[in-house]
Amino acid sequence: MNMKTRYPLLLAASVFALVSFAPVSAYALVKCAVLAAETNINDTNDIQSKLMGTGQFSSVTVVNIHTSTPTLADLKTYGSVLVFSDNTIYDAGSLGDRLADYVDGGGGVVVAVFAIGDLQIGGRFASDDYYAIEPGAGTNTFTSASLGTVYHSDSPVMTGVTTFAGGSTPSRISSATINANAVRVADWSDGLPLVATRVLNGTNRVDLNFFPPSGDAGTGGWVSSTNGAQILANALVLAASPVAEIQTPAPEVTVPPTVAIRGKKRTATTKTVYVVKGTASATTTSVVLTIGKVKRLRVAKGTVNWTFRAHLKPGANKIVAEAIDGSGQKSVPAKITVILR
């Protein structure tokens, strides 16, 4: 089935080399492939040149999956691959098995129309449901639409994307739904899903509900003055990127305050008021003391260097000091005994 038959030319695998485009980020350029079940070389040339024009790729290779199926070893030479179809896939089952193995091994896969429509991937990719946008067969729509609600503007797929227009007859899947484990990133203006992402077996997956060639290749493509190329490029770069690990912060280790009383641990006096002097750590917010068997807390004057006027009773007076910090942590008590003669 060819949804847009115009120039039935058999395309061969080809590569468009990087010439003068600068990377748009500090990350290494991605080596990617376009797996195209397509006989119109204008379409694949357009995708290839548009992707290279973003400056995010070291090379973009076109592989014709209408006439052959790449091996897993072939796929592993790329950081990510874009899969779309406008003709039957040569061996949809084998392709799906290899793409699933590729994803399991960390390879990035981006699937677009009509590989999520009438001309689907088969094998384990389908049976084990590796999709972010669930495919819908026989429900293609070609009504005009543009970028609608963006649910996650912080998604890497939407970086630098401000406009996207499908043109007068954009190729989309009207029955496409979002996988239960996927994130709906953006919709078309009529509410159909446009972009969805998913993390599968530790690998980023992205699906796009639009036909990848732009209108520069012919009728039915997205408007090339809008950010379709950026969406495609961002999707491929995200798929090629490792999943960011969620770092659980280590519990904060807080050191309790310390307190010390100056002088001898046991002393004698004939005065009924004894001035206790001491020090505490910098985190201390208060120093509290008890005298004898009375557990009433008394607060010292000062913190790092503190004093306290203790009113003594005849005999031995046990004085206990504790430092307390802002979180309520208490120090190991410091103790002295003062004997009133």
Image (cartoon, rainbow, N blue to C red):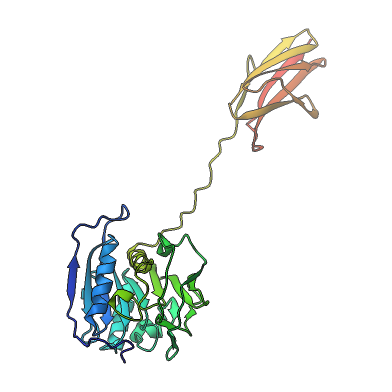
User: Please, is residue 151 above or below residue 139 in the view?
Assistant: above
Q: Quadrant of the C terminus?
A: top right
**Where residue 111 appears, x then y in whole percent?**
36, 77
Q: Nearer the viewer, residue 8 or 105?
A: 8
Residue occupying image coordinates x 43% and y 63% = 158
Residue lying at the far top of the rendered structure: 270
**Where residue 146 appears, x then y in whole percent?**
46, 73
**Where residue 134 appears, x then y in whole percent?**
45, 81
User: Please, is residue 128 above or below residue 289 in the view?
Assistant: below
Report the side of 72 relative to 166 (left or right). Answer: left
- Write down the quadrant of residue 223 in the picture: bottom left
Residue occupying image coordinates x 74% and y 22% = 318
Report the side of 295 relative to 4 (left or right). Answer: right
Q: Nearer the viewer, residue 140 or 337?
A: 140
Report the side of 241 relative to 197 (left or right). Answer: left
Residue 213 visible in this rendered orientation of the protein = no
Q: Quadrant of the N terminus?
A: bottom left
User: Please, is residue 115 above or below residue 317 in the view?
Assistant: below
- Write down the quadrant of residue 131 in the picture: bottom left
Q: Nearer the viewer, residue 32 or 95?
A: 32
**Where residue 288 appears, x then y in whole percent?**
72, 27
Report the side of 192 relative to 256 (left or right). Answer: left
Residue occupying image coordinates x 67% and y 37% = 328
- Write down the quadrant of residue 162 in the picture: bottom left
Residue 116 visible in this rendered orientation of the protein = yes
